[in-house]
């Protein structure tokens, strides 16, 4: 996946104009910025939350928070990094809340998913979907802090220092979280009859 | 020595997606060719990562557009109170009715938002609005005209009339702007709750106490009163009160027996705005520099991170800030790949600040670096020291596991 978050605050003149417009609350500029970064945020939130329904809700909360916070955006980081930090903070808060824990199992199919991804109903895609569900199920069983650090570093490929910055934790604590999440997930996957064989399968 | 290497290989396996140096990639490849356990784990992780990629389906363009539009719709609802002084607290009767109706409507239309802010109205009438601080944290502005009771996290907080405050649910901090509140904190939750005023802040684990901008009185349990920079002013027990009628706070602790509310005319004169001139080494400035150093480190801008840390270390710092700055120096060395310097810097923090969380963090980090550098004996000694010093520490489980693995890997004499 490679490094996807660029933290270096180097802006072109056009970007600076856009940021200035966003600071002033220009709706069109805000909308352009949000739509430009939405795919990245969706992927990030999708990995953390594991459900498209949650992703839409979290995305909306992220944009809402960003609308309010933009006037104080100091351009010390790229807009995408800043939005990612807000998204992760909101996801962390949501995952910690008791209301989220009460929701229990995630639905198998969400109406928010791009319908194009649902046209393929071959047996292998059903198997993959079931495996994805099992993976999400096991990830949900890991504590939010550990899970978020793990998915950002191991699945999303962010360097550990960036994960630490995004989650407002020290590098040592982040390493520890990733370490424990990996052990727990591997142990669970090895015990799961649907997942334990993926090591020998050629997963695309 | 395969087992000893496995602990290091685990870190490389995790970091594979983020990219490995050529040398590390070679080490990993060689090890995977020899070690069946690690090879299986690598394949499993690859499979899970591919599944995760397959599962991270994008939202439909309609859902994405909906998220953006709804965010705008919520943001543009006119339920946000402006920060303009008394005109906001005393609107006209019609304005008050309209504002209340809007707030009620907005609460009804977005019940989840109030849940997210950890805010639940119990009785009375309070106005509240949710906004995001720059950090992305949810901030709930609360205003009471005639009093009301609200549940904030694990505390039941009674707002006296004409009180205004901001609630930060993530940090469990209530920032009192004017008026006074009575907080009843559930001790069973074992979680901190803090009330900040411009002059002092009150830390509590479980108790009942009343705070105004200028005074605090404890009914049950114990609280600690601090200056805004974190230095302790007083520790209060049941019946104690602490008054700070002028800035800077003078220690004036008195024990009271009356159960009457803190009277607005006596102990709580509405204070003039407290001027807090920012000195060159003010805690806020130091915190900002530390934040910037953390950010620079995350950007791998090591020169900037080191420069900021050096600047901070030249200031007159609190112990916590010095420990934090030295830890950042160690992390800079770690990111630069200079493991010897990082381990030495961590050891210094561990030695000097053993009673702070940063000290605990540093002791474990130095042992882990030793383990990753294949310095088995030193790593074992470091982990043993960690377990002895912090038997209930945050990394006990990991230290125990690593120590066991190191012992298994080291041939018996």
Image: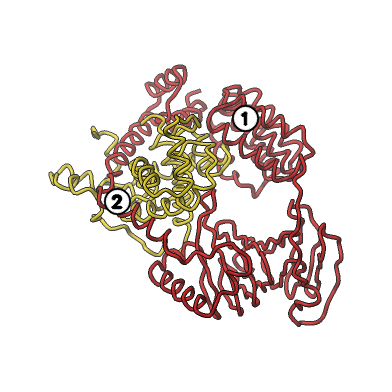
Question: In the image shown, does B275 or B121 lie closer to the viewer?
Answer: B275
Residue at which label 1 appears: B305
Disc 1 from disc 2: Cα separation = 39 Å
Question: In the image shown, does A196 or A152 lie closer to the viewer?
Answer: A152
Q: Quadrant of residue A104?
A: bottom left
Chain letter behind tag 1? B
Q: Any idea which chain is the red one in this picture?
A: B
Q: Any idea which chain is the yellow one in this picture?
A: A
Can residue B19 be seen by looking at this rendering?
yes
Is A139 on the left-hand or right-hand side of B324?
Answer: left
Can residue A189 be seen by looking at this rendering?
no
Callout 2 crowding tier (Cα within 10 Å): few <14, some 14–19, many ≥20 = some
Is A112 on the left-hand or right-hand side of A64?
Answer: left
Callout 1 crowding tier (Cα within 10 Å): few <14, some 14–19, many ≥20 = many
Vertical order, B80 against A181 (above or below): below
Chain letter behind tag 2? B
Instruction: Specify which label sits upstream in the sequence, 1 or 2.
Output: 2
Q: Which mark is residue B65?
A: 2
Question: In the image shown, does B356 or A73 lie closer to the viewer?
Answer: A73
User: Which quadrant, please, contains the C terminus of chain B?
Assistant: top right
Vertical order, B355 against B168 (above or below): above
């Amino acid at each position: 996946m490679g490094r996807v978050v660029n933290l270096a605050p180097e802006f072109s003149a056009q970007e600076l104009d856009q940021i200035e417009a966003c600071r002033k609350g220009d709706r069109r500029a805000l909308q352009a910025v949000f739509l430009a970064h939405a795919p990245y945020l969706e992927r990030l939130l999708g990995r953390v939350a594991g459900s498209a329904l949650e992703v839409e809700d979290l995305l909306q909360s992220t944009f809402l928070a960003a609308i309010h916070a933009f006037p104080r955006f100091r351009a010390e980081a790229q807009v995408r990094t800043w939005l990612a930090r807000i998204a992760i903070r909101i996801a962390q808060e949501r995952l910690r809340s008791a209301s989220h824990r009460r929701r229990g199992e995630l639905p198998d199919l969400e109406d928010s998913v791009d319908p194009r991804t649902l046209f393929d109903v071959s047996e292998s895609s059903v198997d993959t979907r079931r495996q994805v569900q099992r993976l999400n199920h096991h990830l949900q069983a890991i504590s939010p802090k550990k899970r978020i650090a793990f998915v950002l570093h191991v699945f999303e490929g962010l360097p550990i220092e960036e994960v630490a910055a995004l989650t407002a934790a020290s590098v040592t604590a982040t390493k520890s979280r990733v370490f424990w999440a990996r052990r727990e997930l591997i142990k669970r996957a090895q015990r799961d009859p649907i997942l334990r064989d993926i090591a020998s399968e050629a997963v695309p | 020595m395969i087992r000893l290497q496995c602990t290091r290989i685990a870190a490389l396996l995790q970091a594979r997606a983020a990219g490995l140096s050529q040398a590390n990639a070679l080490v990993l490849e060689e090890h995977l060719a020899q070690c069946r356990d690690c090879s299986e784990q690598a394949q499993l992780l690859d499979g899970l990562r591919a599944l995760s990629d397959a599962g991270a389906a994008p939202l439909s363009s309609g859902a994405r557009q909906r998220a953006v539009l709804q965010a705008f719709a919520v943001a543009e609802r006119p339920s946000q109170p402006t920060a303009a002084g008394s005109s906001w607290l005393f609107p006209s009767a019609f304005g008050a009715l309209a504002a209340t109706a809007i707030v009620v409507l907005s609460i009804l239309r977005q019940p989840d938002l109030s849940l997210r802010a950890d805010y639940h109205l119990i009785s009375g009438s309070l106005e509240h609005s949710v906004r995001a601080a720059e950090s992305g944290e949810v901030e709930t502005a609360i205003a009471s005209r005639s009093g009301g009771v609200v549940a904030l996290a694990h505390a039941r907080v009674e707002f006296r009339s004409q009180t205004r405050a901001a609630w930060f649910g993530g940090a469990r901090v209530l920032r009192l702007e004017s008026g006074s509140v009575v907080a009843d904190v559930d001790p069973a939750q074992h979680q901190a709750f803090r009330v900040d005023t411009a002059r002092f802040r009150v830390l509590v684990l479980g108790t009942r106490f009343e705070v105004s901008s200028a005074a605090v009185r404890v009914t049950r349990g114990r609280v600690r009163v601090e200056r805004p920079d974190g230095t302790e002013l007083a520790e209060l027990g049941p019946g104690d009160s602490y008054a700070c009628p002028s800035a800077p706070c003078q220690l004036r602790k008195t024990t009271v027996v009356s159960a009457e509310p803190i009277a607005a005319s006596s102990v709580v004169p509405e204070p003039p705005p407290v001027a807090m001139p920012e000195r060159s080494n003010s805690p806020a400035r130091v915190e900002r520099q530390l934040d910037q150093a953390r950010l620079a480190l995350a950007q791998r801008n090591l020169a900037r991170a080191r420069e900021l840390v050096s600047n901070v270390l030249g200031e007159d710092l609190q112990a916590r800030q010095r420990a934090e700055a030295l830890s950042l120096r160690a992390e800079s060395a770690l990111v630069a790949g200079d493991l010897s310097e990082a381990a030495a810097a961590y050891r210094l923090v561990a030695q000097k600040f053993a009673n702070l969380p940063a000290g605990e963090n540093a002791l474990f980090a130095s042992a882990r670096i030793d383990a990753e550098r294949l310095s088995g004996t030193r790593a074992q000694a470091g982990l043993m020291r960690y377990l002895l010093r912090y038997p209930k520490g945050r990394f006990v489980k990991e230290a125990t596991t690593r120590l066991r693995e190191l012992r298994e890997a080291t041939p018996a004499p």
